[in-house]
Image (cartoon, rainbow, N blue to C red):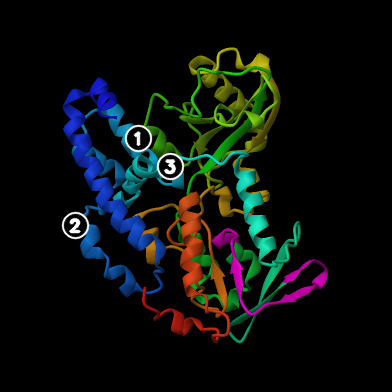
Amino acid sequence: MRAEVARFSPDDVAGYEAFMVRSREIFEKGYLELGHVPFLTPWSMVRTLPTLVRLECYRSVLGLVRKHIRSDKLRQVFSFHPLLVGGDPQHAPAIYALICHLERTWGVHFAVGGMGAVVDGLVRVLAELGVELRLSTPVEEIMVEDGNAHGVRIGGGVQIDADLIVCNGDVSWSYQHLVQPRHRPRNSDRKLRQYRYSMSLFLIYFGTDRTYDELSHHTIVLGPRYEGLLDDIFRHHRLAPDMSLYLHAPTRSDPTLAPPGCEAFYVLSPVPNLSAAIDWKTTREAYRDAIYDRLENTCLPGLRQHIVTERLFTPDDFESELSSHLGAAFSFEPTLTQSAYFRGHNACPDIANLYFVGAGTHPGAGLPGVLSSARVTDSLIPAAGEPLVRPAVLRHAPA
């Protein structure tokens, strides 16, 4: 890394090292310590402020990188990481700079067999624990009585009783569609509309009848603009003529994901969520073609003539297939005022026995964040045999 930094900007090597020291300090506090504890009270947030101020987390990620690194290209390289969790590097707090140290220390890993293999592994664990799985069974309502969640209603009016409920659906969508408004004054529809939501994604899953051996598993194709493109996506909510792309080629690490001599890919482009006036039904093919043009001109020559299978996934699909409010791919945008206590609470503040996990809760989006949210929620759920706790008690639980 030092050699690569020096290749672009020899004067930035020392700044890079200083930035990575800060990234490590933020990682140790923000992830190892605070990433696994609940933030259910304002006081739990206040107690962390002196340390966060000392670590300069009042800056944005891009602002922190700018302090240490002068090369515009290197600033992009070391500040884009909030996009991995749905954030704008210009506004995401510098606590998300911890990702740089996390990647350098623990690496970036890929599950052989893809994410489906991770799901299969979790299913095996659930089966060993005797868990009953009901697949393709949409929940229509979380049942609440006297301030207590006591079950869920599924199709046909069937009700499943439960001592407690853990919901891993999109927090905003779940509140608005599964919990009657009178039960959630602190998560009213009005309040949920006031949140800023993350960007969405335009995805193309495609396969080719040839391999591209010169590719790496991960390729990031940066566009001609950086800050301007981020503004178009997050602030102006418009589809820009240029784009930055992430190309995922899992067959570079796991050839079993495609037939011999073939390659499997997906490419994603960050785009505005559905608060933007974009008709994806009429735009999707043209935007797909623009992405293919960009790939052919950068890293996949002659791509179109080798595509044998394709599936598009737009912000509309995030909303309709994944029940994500506004088609946001990462739930609430990770800003300073939408982090920790200000994010979706892992324990519902209005309803006893109702818990949440996932991207909209603390600590946030991304696979490490989502798994950490489950760890936080698990710490709040009473052990077997202990009495269930009302939210008034949970709000005063030590963080």
For disc 2, the marked residue is: 54
Q: Quadrant location of the N terminus? A: top left
User: Residue visible at 69% across and 29% down?
Assistant: 310
Q: Quadrant of residue 202?
A: top right
Identity, as a three-letter code, of the amino acid under mark 1: Glu
The percent coordinates of residue 107 (x first, y second) are: 41, 40
- Mark nearest the camera among 2 and 1 is 2
For disc 3, the marked residue is: 83
Distance of label 3 from label 2 (alpha carbons) = 24 Å
Q: Which mark is residue 227?
A: 1
Sequence-wise, which precedes: disc 1 or disc 3? 3
User: Residue visible at 61% across and 27% down?
Assistant: 288
User: Residue visible at 67% across and 56% down?
Assistant: 124
- Residue 216 is at least partly visible in this image: yes
Q: Is residue 214 magenta?
A: no
Q: Which residues are magenta?
A: 153-173
